[in-house]
Image (tube, helix red, strand yellow):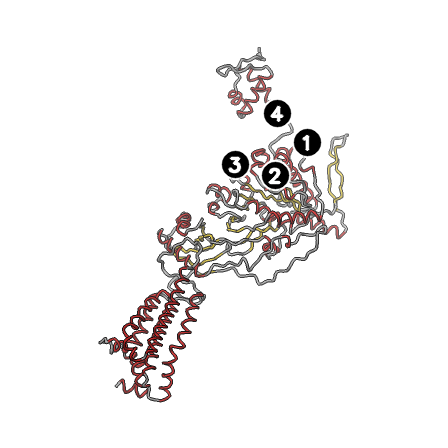
Amino acid sequence: MLDSQVYSVFSHPFVRSFYFFVGLSGTLFLIPLMIIASRLVLKGYVQRLSIKLVGWIVVTTCVLSLTFSVSNLLGFKGYDAAGLIGAVLSRELSLVVENETAFWGIQFGWLILALLLNIWANPRLIGDALEFVTYIEQKSQTFLYHQSKVMTTLIKATIWLYNKIFKKLERHRKGSVFVSPSITSPKIKKTKVSEEKGQSTGRIEPSVERPKASAEKKQTSLDLGNAPGNLPTTSLLTPFDEQKDDLQIPDENLQRNAELLDGVLQDFGVKGEVISVKPGPVVTLYEFEPAPGIRSQRIIGLADDIARSMGALAARVAVIPGRNAIGIELPNAHRKTVYMRELLESREYKSKGVLNIVLGKTIGGDPVAADLTKMPHLLIAGTTGSGKSVAINVMILSLLYRLKPEECRLIMVDPKMLELSVYDGIPHLLAPVVTDPKKAVMALRWVVQEMEERYKKMSKVQVRNIGGYNERMKEAEQKGEVLTRTIQTGFNPDNGEPVYEEEQLGYERLPYIVIIIDEMADLMMVAGKEVEAAVQRLAQMARAAGIHIIMATQRPSVDVITGTIKANFPTRVSFQVTTRIDSRTILDEVGAEQLLGRGDMLFRESGGRVRRLHGPFVSDEEVADVVNFLKQGAEPDYSLAITEPRDDADQGSSSIFGSNVDSDDEETNLFNRAVDIVARDRKASTSYIQRKLSIGYNRAARIIEQMEDEGIVGPANHVGKREILVRDPEE
């Protein structure tokens, strides 16, 4: 009954011709389509299906199209009922068109279609499909030889073609490059990267977020020469080759690393999944969403184990603020170079801000610049080779590229005499680069006095900060207004009352002053109390006066970065440090010990948020070119009084640094009291003087030595006792 119905349907001449054409052309057209699909798979344009689904597609296709004919061909029985659709599509159709060539063309076309679906889904199943084709070819070779030698040759050629494609796909799969070349991929579950937003899958798929290239055309710098007052041009710096440096990690590699990271965390008993991947120039951020009940500190404590399992140099794990996710940062196999010129030409640096300094790029590759007036002071720490000195040069160049000498003046303190000496002679300096720690203390004292003088000037014109003062001066100059202030010129000899006079203020603007200290540890060793007191006073009050400090140290220990200094430096930058203790000292949290060096930093803003940045590189030749440009434009105007000792310091300024103008009289009084105690009690020892006068051991020892020199007590004998040579004054 079925045969007659099928025959009636396919008996029309047009239908016969159509299926005859389909049978012959199926093989010829599907093979090129198969090659195109394989190339799409090679390039990663085709999303692969799961292995189970592909297996069902292949098996179902083969069963529906070939069961009837294969059962007859191989002599199998019991498949007639299952091969009804195969009979309609193949056997009965061949009877209708009465052409065996069309029969084998249709059969072979369906076989190619099944293999094509296999390739489309997953190249690893080609081996199984080839075994199936080879099995059919071996079983049917004798029969096909009698029917058509051409079909035998065509099947062998197709098998050869499949073998070639399979080998090419296998080489491509084995040659994939991941974030770490030493990673051996284990058997892990398949993780797909969602290409369409809102695609519903069985799990949250990790999305790859790449930084968008700026579509804004960069304006070339005009060469205005080195006339006085001109700012340096970016042509003095190394150009940024965007095409050469564009080394993006393929999405497939990021996907496999996300799967591998999932597997590593599962091995340590941490349940969850990677929901997002953000590749950057130096590291890649994997956002991991833990399962409910997983503590953040548990994952953070696995940083070293994650780095070891992933084959990475280091791994930093931290909580992402405001999100239910843990950020896991792994280094890239090939890190990109961040160029200074690129950041100076960025929109972030050119935005509004008085003392904008470039810091680097984020993990996503976005430029970052910050205004020093809002920090208002910056503390930098890092070991040797971490990029600390390069970062200081970058910050100095950021100021030199933005501000003229009349707008910003610099005071540089370089106890190492190597890092900042190249800037000697630029017009922005208030004094030559200070290399003597004692002169550095004098410079800090001068800055404190300058701060107090600026506060007096601002109070006279009733403004609150240096910006308001300069605007007030500009407005008064435009209106021709005369500004005066009252100053004390002396005392009236008749009644002793102070004499005041009115002094006319000029229209001179106050420039910003930036103090750059390259090595704080050396200053703390020479004059720790004085330096700490000066830095504390400036950090607390100098912001409104337009005075800011950039302080760096190689040894972020508690004796260098004291609690007083930390409290007044809310904005800090930490490069690579050696221990977690150093990281907590500078940032109040761990993580800096996991940095990679060479400009890799953690930037802690005043609000407490910590961001990972990658600082730009600037060579010594680039710094020298910019310095030579500035030297040719103008001569420096030094104020030698900055580093000269001042004997007329007032009582307030002296007390700031822990000193006193009457210190000699105090020492004399203390010595006289000690002599009275020794003469009265007839005891002369360092510990006794220390207890009686409540002074330190060193001070008491000096007093005893002075008594011995003046003949008040004799030398110590073999048991340490001294003879008292003066009489008791009461006798």
Between marks 4 and 1, how big is the CA–CA gap?
Answer: 18 Å
- The residue under label 3 is which amino acid type? Asp
Between marks 4 and 2, how big is the CA–CA gap?
Answer: 37 Å
Q: Position of residue 300 (x, y in %)?
A: 42, 49
Q: Earlier in the sequence, mark 4 or mark 1?
A: 1
- What element does badge 3 sit on? loop
Mark 1 neighbour density, 10 Å: few (under 14) some (14–19) many (20 or more): few
The residue indicated by pointer 1 is 647
The residue indicated by pointer 3 is 559
629 relative position to 705: left or right: right
The residue indicated by pointer 4 is 666
Front-lying residue, 684 or 522? 522
**Closer to us: mark 3 or mark 2?**
2
**Closer to us: mark 1 or mark 3?**
3
Q: Is residue 540 visible?
A: no
- The residue under label 1 is which amino acid type? Asp
* Above or below 722: residue 557: below
Identify the residue at horizontal 39%, vertical 56% (top origin): 260
